[in-house]
Amino acid sequence: MSNRYEQALARASAKFRLSGMEAAKKGIIPYKSENGRWVPSPFCGNGWWTGGFWPGLMWQLWVYTSDNWFREEARRAEALLVEEFRRFTELNHDVGFMYLLSCGADWKLSGDEQARIDTLHAASLMMGRFNPRGFFRAWDGADRTGYAIIDCMMNLSLLFWASRQTEDPRFAHAARIHADTAMREFLRPDGSVSHIIEFDPETGARVREHPGQGYALGTQWSRGQAWGLYGFTLAYLNTKDPRYLETAERIAANFVSHIRPDGLTDCDFCQPPEEERLDNIAGAVAACGLLELDKATGNAAWRDAAEKLVNGMLDLCVDWSDGQCGLLTRCTASYHDDGAGRHTNITYGDYFLVEALMKLTGRDPMLWM
Ligand code: GLY
């Protein structure tokens, strides 16, 4: 099977080497492939939470190929993201996604000191969103002072990284406080997780759950399940706290029980059965988390499940043609379309599929830590 993953990586690197030149020529950070061509985020441009995935993909492919074109393309995007520090008001808790995979990856793979400083800058911005009543505030907006979301579990890695870098435990303390809150308030008895929980910003008391990007209130948005799965796995890898591992495995067991027979991933595990709505990004993120869980626990069932997801995508949902910039198809940003796209390509799907292939072939540089 690993030969299949080797071949997929070889083809992916050739594809992105070609289509990446279009992104460089346009001077954009690709958000998705539309009519076969890369387009930037229609939301707030390079400040959108997804900006780190393109440079992250380029760094992964630089590790794979040693072709310095990928490194230069990653740095072109990194420079655009660093400019976003000046805009500031567009940035939110997703600085983890944005800057770990860009500046953080640059520092990790090249030792560049400015990239390290920029990553620390991002961690300090993240700390500015901490509410000492127990959570990181996700988004801005007067009505959202108490909003926390499961996706944030992925952003916490930036804080654990910053504590190691600075030998100052404050970043990690805050990350642990948030992770403990998420374990208590987001995790449900069946191993699924909520997307959005609102807390009272004065007291930290739970106010209510909100419907998020899934089908309806109380359902299981699959990408949220995947963020929880991989996020708690990373919290465990960062802390070695067995409670986080146990949580990650509970979320994983629920996710695995919902993988479709063809290996693809529904957008919401509670969506109406007659509705064919997929989000392969959820499957790609989950595969990465499951492969880390396999390494952490030695339980091969996690690797088997990850392979089922990756094989489903490789069998049915990758577009290798040169006429199409992006790779992974049938990705859905939100169950109820918010304009970002349904059954389309989005670059974070490409990033996580390539990360999973790098893990499956023993090459992943682990850019999250
Ligand atoms: N983190 C936002 C999303 O997954 O759409």
Image (cartoon, helix red, strand yellow):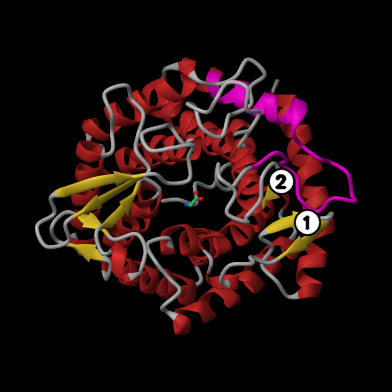
- Give the residue furthest to the bottom: 86
Whether residue 182 is visible here, answered yes or no, is: yes
Q: Quadrant of residue 311?
A: top right
Residue sitting at x 42%, y 79%: 88
Frontmost residue, 99 versus 70: 99
Whether residues under marks 1 and 2 lie with C-beta atoms below 8 angstroms apart, the answer is yes
Q: Is residue 310 magenta?
A: yes
Q: Is residue 357 magenta?
A: no
The residue beneath circle 2 is 344
Q: Mark 1 near ligand 1 (CB under 8 Å)?
A: no
Q: Which mark is residue 34?
A: 1
Q: What amino acid does circle 2 point to?
A: Thr
As helix, strand or loop, the secondary structure at mark 2 comes to: loop
Whether residue 167 is visible here, answered yes or no, is: no
- Give the residue furthest to the left: 203
Frontmost residue, 79 versus 321: 321
Q: Position of residue 156 (x, y in %)?
A: 33, 53
Q: Tell me where the magenta segment starts and ends, as one range.
A: 305-331
Where 13 falls versus 190 (above or below)?
A: below
Residue sitting at x 41%, y 26%: 252
Q: Is residue 8 left or right of residue 108?
A: right
Frontmost residue, 30 versus 204: 204
